[in-house]
Amino acid sequence: MNKDSKILVLGHKGLVGSAVIRELEKQKYLNILTTANVRYDLRLRSSAELVMYDFKPDYVFLCAAKVGGIGINNEHSAEMIHDNLALQTSVIEACHKFNVKKLMFLGSSCIYPKYCPQPIKEEYLLTGELEQTNIGYAVAKIAGIIMCNMYRKQYGCNFISAMPTNLYGPRDNFHLENSHVLPALIRKFHDAKESDKKYIELWGSGTPLREFLYIEDLAQALVFLMNNYDESDIINIGMGKDISIKELAEIIQEIVGFEGSIIWDGSKPDGTPKKLLDISKINNLGWTATTELKKGIEQTYKWFIENYEISRL
């Protein structure tokens, strides 16, 4: 990308999109475009084409998606598969129709099989059964990856697909019912502290292992890949180390300052037992994450406190 290239970030209000914009600004890109002033429903092909017609971007970061934690993925599975399939299909086709130079499609580490060899290499995709609690979202993302590759094969489109691990950071969703595990824990511990509770209940056994990547690191990786990666194969983005949910909860408890106890509700689902990405491919290209987990959580909690009225919605 040149510094004056027209770069469209779809999903600019979200965790990923807002971080990509901050990173582009930090790197002095001059022509960053968003749909901030006009409301488009990207699930509709006509709206996606109108966006491309209005902005005529050279490069597109597709950060818009319908996302959530185990609860919302499980209970709203039809919406997850429908909305994500509709949105990404419309945008990918519109990028082809309007000759976008390059599209960055974002998948997720949840696309990999539930019982996958660890760490998870990119070639493990479609080699086993998916985790049932988020199968709708995962299937939609897999379809997006395949669609990008088919458009590359048939039309020569430079569409690439990146697979980030679990993300967190400023502007995350801290809603108790539909957020991911890390921001949900921040909210639960904070509210328990403010209410002077003696204990809090958390889902599952606490034993599953998860990898977490600070959102600013992801944004750096995405801009890096847009400038340095042009292959059809998917590419993982992560930290290269994982932690149990129990250990994660204890770190957050310490940072928040909650002095009560934790009760684990074993009747609730754990999800995939372990999910650690093999990040050797992106490391070999020259990119490595730099934000350690505790520091990232401290920065995220600071943002949460400073933006409490909007972050708790």
Image (cartoon, rainbow, N blue to C red):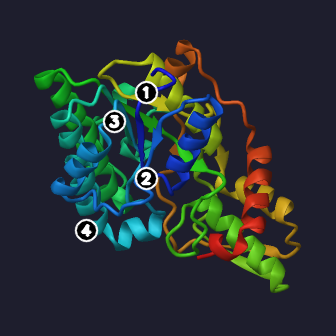
Q: Nearer the viewer, residue 98 or 311?
A: 98
Pointer 3 residue: 57
Residues at discs 2 and 4 in contact (Cβ within 8 Å): no
Closer to us: mark 2 or mark 1?
A: 1
Pointer 4 residue: 78
Disc 2/disc 4 C-alpha distance (Å): 21 Å
Mark carried by residue 11: 2
Tell me: residue 5, above or below residue 180: above
Looking at the image, can residue 278 be seen?
Answer: no
Disc 1/disc 4 C-alpha distance (Å): 37 Å
Name the amino acid, label 4. Ala
Toward the left, the furthest residue is: 154
Asked if residue 219 lies left or right of residue 46, the reply is right
Task: Locate residue 6: give its quadrant.
Answer: top left
Q: Nearer the viewer, residue 146 or 48?
A: 48
Residues at discs 3 and 4 in contact (Cβ within 8 Å): no
Residue occupying the point 66% across, 50% down: 244
Name the amino acid, label 2. Gly
Closer to us: mark 2 or mark 4?
A: 2
Q: Position of residue 73 (x, y in %)?
A: 39, 65
Task: Locate residue 72: give its quadrant.
Answer: bottom left
Quadrant of the snapshot with the N terminus? top left
Q: Position of residue 272 (x, y in %)?
A: 47, 52
Q: Earlier in the sequence, mark 3 or mark 4?
A: 3
